[in-house]
Amino acid sequence: YVASTKTLFYVHYPGHMKVGLVDNEHLISEVDIFPTFLEATGVRIDQQLDGTSFLPLLLEKPQKRNGYIIGQIDYKAGGSATPMRSYGDKKFRYIFNPWSPTGDAYRNNNEGKINRDIEENHPEYLRYVEFFRHRSLEEFYDVQNDPDATINLINDPNYKKEIKKYRRGLKNWMQLKNDPVLFLFEQRNSPEKLKAYLADEMIYPSKKSLMPKEQREAQELKDARKKANKK
């Protein structure tokens, strides 16, 4: 959602960018940070990167970047797989939640006491907690007029053309990145298949297998120490 992915980004680049420069127009993503450091320091590498340098924006120049942002979650800190993907820009956002048909309740490890307080003291907002917990398989929002994502337009015939466009945009990205969620996306009209596929690690990757090598090794060491302490 926009509320959880729209973040202020500050840059200190003395001697290069104008003091007090503010850009409220362009979208950047976390994957753009590394390419920006490389370009700013003059380092060239042969590998193709996921992101695009936003150094031109700091220098008030045009940026060669597509205007969309990808959101990605595969697992939380604990529990089973909860893959989610979003594809959006400053106008609309499409969200795909293949875990939704499993019936599991989504709980975020950083939600704190907010939802608990609503459940106990603010029944007028319970429908929002219920939606947060279970979601819809697909969501589509007009983020210009509904930045808080309170009206899911996925079944609104007036947005049929836009929904098709943003679905296609997400699919193209998943194909480009060989995303394991692509398989689920193509089966989105078969809830029972989605449930079965998410439960099968031969089809959907385990949490550990998705970790970078360094993180995976650190996790294995942590697990080994925990196991040793139990003996």
Image (cartoon, grey):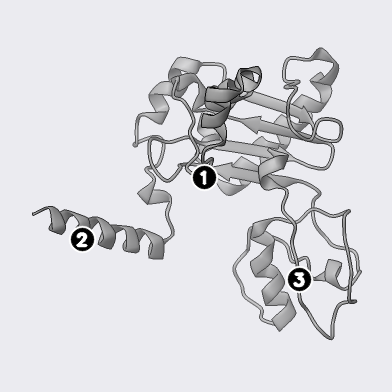
Q: Could you say where residue 144 lies in the image, as x and y percent from the top left?
A: 86, 35
Residue at point 64% right, 44% down? 71
Instruction: Measure the C-alpha gap from mark 3 to mark 2.
Output: 40 Å
Q: Indicate the quadrant containing the C terminus: top left, top right, bottom left or bottom right.
A: bottom left
Question: Is residue 179 depicted above or below 24 in this figure?
Answer: above
Mark sitting earlier along the chain (1/3) = 3
Disc 3 packing (10 Å; few <14; some 14–19; many ≥20): few
Q: Residue furthest front?
A: 121
Residue at point 49% right, 28% down? 99
What residue does disc 2 label? Answer: 225
Mark sitting earlier along the chain (1/2) = 1
Instruction: Measure the C-alpha gap from mark 1 to mark 2.
Output: 26 Å
What residue does disc 1 label? Answer: 110
Mark sitting earlier along the chain (3/2) = 3
The amino acid on which the numbered mark 2 sits, given as a three-letter code, is: Arg
Q: Secondary structure at mark 3?
A: loop
Relative to 1, 179 lies left or right: left
Relative to 30, 81 lies left or right: left
The amino acid on which the numbered mark 1 sits, given as a three-letter code, is: Asn
Relative to 184, 19 lies left or right: right
Residue at point 80% right, 34% down? 143
What residue does disc 3 label? Answer: 11
